[in-house]
Image: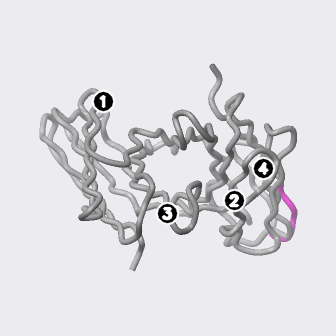
Amino acid sequence: GAGVSQSPSNKVTEKGKDVELRCDPISGHTALYWYRQSLGQGLEFLIYFQGNSAPDKSGLPSDRFSAERTGGSVSTLTIQRTQQEDSAVYLCASSWYRGRGYEQYFGPGTRLTVT
Amino acid sequence: KNEVEQSPQNLTAQEGEFITINCSYSVGISALHWLQQHPGGGIVSLFMLSSGKKKHGRLIATINIQEKHSSLHITASHPRDSAVYICAVRNLIQGAQKLVFGQGTRLTINP
């Protein structure tokens, strides 16, 4: 079946503009995660969804970042008034919540460049 | 100090060598993941462990919960194994769904 997909694959934007990043999880996966990997840095957790609700938003770096998930499926990560430090690869992952447990399947990522 | 520490940070070896990558963590965990990230950036989950040992092909992952340590071994290494290997843990305190990542080990296998 199809894996996790993300769009766009690359996004270049000017400082101060808003951007939306999309994630389509594996069908049936109830949990969805957003991560960020800045250049030369490790992965960092941003937010986790269980269904449409986000029990853990602790990784969002500022109030310019928000995310939503609709229909227990597609998720959108929005960054308002982008800054150069927002440049990174944004990764989405999804998993079952039970059964096989929490093994996460990652999408290919969106490379965001803020100029 | 990071909650998850990997060693070495970089490793270069010749094809056929036995490879070991280590991961130490400082918190109570519910599970540990080993991930592989290829130069193109895609991430693949290799193993999820909560105890003991798992094997998949030439890859073996072990975990010692008492010592808070895990190892990833690659037998008969091949140039296609060249990638960044990332250890990540699910923190018991912070919640079962949040992964905390190590900095990764960049592995290069020369033919």
How far apart are the two marked residues, 3 and 4, measured between alpha carbons?
A: 30 Å
Label 4: which secondary element: strand
Chain identity of mark 2: A
Rendered image: mark on residue B56: 1
- Per the image, the residue denoted by label 2 is A47
- Comparing B68 with B19, the one in front is B68
Taking the spot 57% from the left edge, 41% from the top edge, the residue there is A106
- Per the image, the residue denoted by label 3 is B92
Residue stretch rendered in magenta on the structure: A15-19
Q: Hey, what amino acid is under mark 2?
A: Ile
How far apart are the two marked residues, 3 and 2, measured between alpha carbons?
A: 17 Å
First along the sequence among labels 1 and 3: 1
Q: Hey, what amino acid is under mark 1?
A: His
Q: Is residue A33 left or right of residue A68?
A: left
From where the camera sits, is residue B10 visible?
A: no
Chain identity of mark 4: A
Question: Within 10 Å of the Cα at label 3, are there few (<14), some (14-19), or many (20+) other Cα atoms?
Answer: some
Q: Nearer the viewer, mark 3 or mark 2?
A: 3
x, y percent for residue A29: 68, 35
